[in-house]
């Protein structure tokens, strides 16, 4: 099925998987997935790493990391 034609076989190599950043492909932690939900929306099906989130929202990586700590402290259900 995957090797049915060259184009889809090639594409499947770079196909998005939910455990990886949609933008750069890096493997994501649970915190990064949770932060994506927090910043984009709860129902999102695409996820981004901290670096890409920081770039997209024009903030520093550290700001995102601090937010993760903050939400965890608040007991946010996304970060459990
Ligand atoms: Zn990324």
Image (cartoon, rainbow, N blue to C red):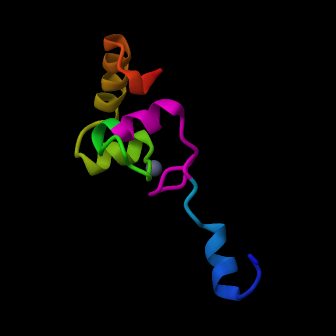
The chief SS type of the magenta part is loop
| Residue at 31%, 17% in the rendered image | 70
Residue 56 placed where, x, y %? Answer: 28, 51
Query: How many numbered callouts?
Result: 0
Residue 41, quarter of picture: top left
Q: Nearer the viewer, residue 63 or 45?
A: 45
Residue 35, quarter of picture: top left
Compared to residue 5, the image places residue 34 above or below, namely above
Residue 21 placed where, x, y %? Answer: 49, 50
Which residue range is magenta in the image? 18-37
Compared to residue 26, the image places residue 50 above or below, namely above
Report if residue 30 lies within the magenta region.
Answer: yes
Residue 39, quarter of picture: top left
Using residue 49 as the reference point, say whether residue 8 is left or right of it: right
Compared to residue 15, the image places residue 46 above or below, namely above
Residue 37 placed where, x, y %? Answer: 36, 39
Using residue 5 as the reference point, say whether residue 63 is left or right of it: left
Residue 57 placed where, x, y %? Answer: 24, 46
| Residue at 66%, 68% in the rendered image | 13
């Amino acid at each position: 099925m995957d090797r049915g034609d060259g184009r889809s076989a090639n594409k499947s190599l770079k196909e998005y998987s939910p455990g990886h950043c949609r933008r750069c492909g890096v493997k994501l932690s649970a915190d990064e997935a949770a932060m994506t939900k927090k910043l984009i929306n709860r129902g999102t099906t695409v996820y981004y790493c901290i670096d890409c989130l920081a770039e997209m929202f024009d903030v520093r990586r550290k700001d995102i990391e601090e937010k993760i700590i903050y939400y965890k402290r608040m007991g946010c259900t996304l970060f459990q």
